[in-house]
Structures are given as structure tokens and as C-alpha cells.
Image: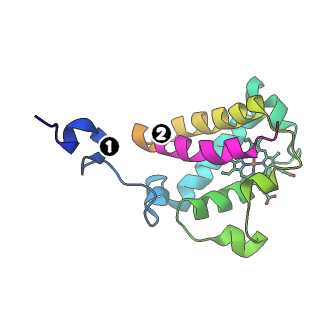
Amino acid sequence: MKPQQEDISAVSKPTAPVYGVGDSTLQAAGGEAGVKKLVEAFYEYMDTLPEAEIIRAMHAEDLTESREKLTTFLVGWMGGPSRYSEKYGSMNIPGAHRHLAIGVAEKEAWLLCMQKALDDQGYEEVFKRYVMVQLSFPAEMCRNR
Ligand code: HEM
């Protein structure tokens, strides 16, 4: 007998959370306050993890502006208000990183900081995986070596 769709993929079950529709991702992240906390943890890891030293050194000593820009960007990216483009114009992620030397190690360090920051937020496992998968595409596109 042919298996039913629901037997093949748990992801297609109607109870699976839906992200990426409207601002559902932002809601799952705890709204704008949640994204702010996530980004604070992200830069805290970047500031302290030995694996991230190489990418920390690419940033200004004071991370205030980086925190503000990444928070604003992610709020829009998660379906919230597009304040980043209103303030700074449209953002081409790889283009904004072209002046930086980003290879596999740098990309992995960035994603490691994000994974650890997500782990600290008490999010659902499936939500953390969704965010990591979604961010792995632009992170890969930032690689220029
Ligand atoms: C792949 C590894 C990545 C590295 C090593 C990296 C590193 C950096 C650095 C050093 C800056 C500051 C640039 C400067 O001051 O000139 C920056 C800015 C920024 N990055 Fe990344 N980044 C990475 C991936 C990403 C990804 C995947 C995203 C978004 C999904 C992102 C979003 C941003 C944003 C929004 C800014 C602020 C741009 C601006 O308005 O100046 N980055 N990044």
C-alpha cells in the first residue's frame, strides 16, 4: 500500500509550527525584544569565543552599532517592520560583506555564535533549526574565498 503523506514527512503534519509566514518568525523569536536579546548574546559570544576571534577582529572595538544594525536587520528579515531598509537603504547581504575576507572558518565562526546565542534563548528546537538553516544560505553567500 502507498504510504500516506503524513507517514513520510513529520514536517508536513498540520501540528508542525509554521515560520516564515507574515511575522510568525518574529513572534517565535519573542518579538523585537527577543531579537534584541538574541543579538546581544550573539555579540557576547563573538567577543569571547576563541573560535570567533578572527571575525571579532573585523568589527569595530565598540559593538554598539553592530548590535543595533543586526537587530534592526533581523527584525525585518523575520517579517517585522523593515526599519533597516528605511534607515540604511536596501541591503544586499553578500555585497555588504564584500570588503571582508570571509572563508569557511569565518562563516562557521559566525554561525557558531548564532547557534550558541539561539541555545541561550529557551527557543523550541525546531525554531532554532529553522533559523540556522535560513541563515546558513546568506552566510554561505558572504563567503568570498
Ligand atoms: C558569514 C559570516 C559573516 C561575517 C564574518 C560577518 C561579519 C560582519 C562584519 C565584520 C560586519 C561589520 C562591517 C563593517 O563594519 O564594515 C558585518 C556587518 C553586518 N552583517 Fe555580517 N557577517 C557575516 C554574516 C552575516 C549574515 C549571514 C548576516 C545576515 C543574515 C549579516 C548581517 C550583517 C548586517 C545587517 C551588518 C550591518 C551592515 C551595515 O549596515 O553596515 N552578516 N558583518
Residue situated in front as seen by the camera: 131 or 60: 131
Task: Say which residue label 1 marks.
Answer: 11
Task: Identify the residue shown where x is 20% and y is 37%.
Answer: 7
| Drawn side of residue 2 relative to residue 124, left or right | left
Q: How is the image coloured?
A: rainbow
- Residue 129: mark: 2
Q: Is residue 116 above or below residue 12?
A: above
| Drawn side of residue 73 relative to residue 61, left or right | left
Three-letter code, disc 1: Val
Would you say the beta carbon of the disc 2 residue lies within 8 angstroms of ligand 1? no
Estimate the x, y position of residue 132 in percent, counting from the top left.
55, 41
Magenta part of the chain? 128-145
Q: Is residue 124 visible?
A: no
Q: Residue furthest front?
A: 1
Mark 2: few/some/many CA within 10 Å (<14, 14-19, 20+):
few
Q: Is residue 129 magenta?
A: yes
Q: Is residue 52 magenta?
A: no
Task: Identify the residue shown where x is 58% and y is 35%.
Answer: 115
Q: Secondary structure at mark 2?
A: helix
CA gap between label 2 and label 1 equals 13 Å
Residue situated in front as seen by the camera: 106 or 36: 106
Estimate the x, y position of residue 28 in percent, counting from the top left.
44, 53
Q: Is tag 2's residue or tag 1's residue first in the polypeptide sequence?
A: 1
Q: Main secondary structure of the magenta part?
A: helix
Task: Identify the residue shown where x is 54% and y is 67%.
Answer: 80
Question: Which quadrant of the rendered structure holds the N terminus?
Answer: top left
Q: Secondary structure at mark 1?
A: helix
Q: Residue furthest top?
A: 50
